[in-house]
Image (cartoon, rainbow, N blue to C red):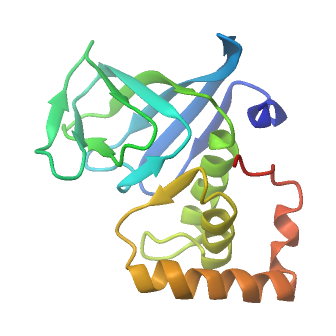
Amino acid sequence: MQNCAMYIHPHTIENKIGEKLCFIRLIKEDGVDKLEVENWVQPGAGPLMHVHWKQDESLTVITGKIGTQIPGEEPKYYGPGETITFYRGTWHRFWNAGNEVLNCKGWIKPADNIEYYLTEIYKAIDAGKNHRPEQTAAAFLMTRYKSEFDVGGIPGFVKKVIIPLQYFIDKISGAHKRFKDAPQPVK
């Protein structure tokens, strides 16, 4: 799958809550697309608990201190030169656990739709309020790419009723037209 090929690399995204991510390049490794990345995370910032159902993700700390957590486990911390790998299907989160900007280099494999998904999520975060993504984009992305990604911390009722209802209303109202070029989800 070459959904990341729709971007010119390097491709950098940034959101207002302190995350900056550069998709450096897309390479083939063992016949699979591997996306090399670099991120910069402000102190205390980092993504919510989430899962990649189809991708492995690895980060090596360049500067700073990264905190990581897998549900049911104690948080772990890594410093410069240390690597953490989150395998597909593993719920996880990470954050800047230090007082300086956290900088990591890493990769995501297979790339599939991760670049599109994160690019649009960052846009939705910037368009939203109270550190929540804008609703139409969030409902579209969470519904369309649910076979690839999921986000924790959202109540079951919201995931099972509110988000599908929002998705349906937005679809019939034409609000999804802005996503007409969205790549097909990986099944």
Q: Residue furthest front?
A: 187
Q: Is residue 16 visible?
A: no
Q: Position of residue 151 (x, y in %)?
A: 45, 60
Q: Position of residue 84 (x, y in %)?
A: 31, 25
- Give the quadrant of the N terminus: top right
Taking 117 as reference, is 125 left or right?
left
Number of numbered callouts drawn: 0
**Residue at coordinates 34% horizontally, 68% vertically from top-left?**
153
Q: Is residue 144 visible?
A: yes
Q: Residue furthest left?
A: 74
**Residue at coordinates 38% horizontally, 63% vertically from top-left?**
152
Q: Position of residue 63 (x, y in %)?
A: 29, 21
Taking 38 as reference, is 117 left or right?
right
Q: From what the image shows, is residue 82 above or below residue 187?
A: above
Taking 176 as reference, is 18 left or right?
left
Q: To which quarter of the image does residue 49 belong?
A: bottom left
Q: To which quarter of the image does residue 169 belong?
A: bottom right
Q: To which quarter of the image does residue 22 belong?
A: top right
Q: Position of residue 89 (x, y in %)?
A: 43, 44
Near-viewer residue (33 or 170):
33
**Residue at coordinates 65% horizontally, 63% vertically from top-left?**
141
Q: From what the image shows, is residue 36 above or below residue 149?
A: above
Q: From what the image shows, is residue 129 above or below residue 54?
A: below
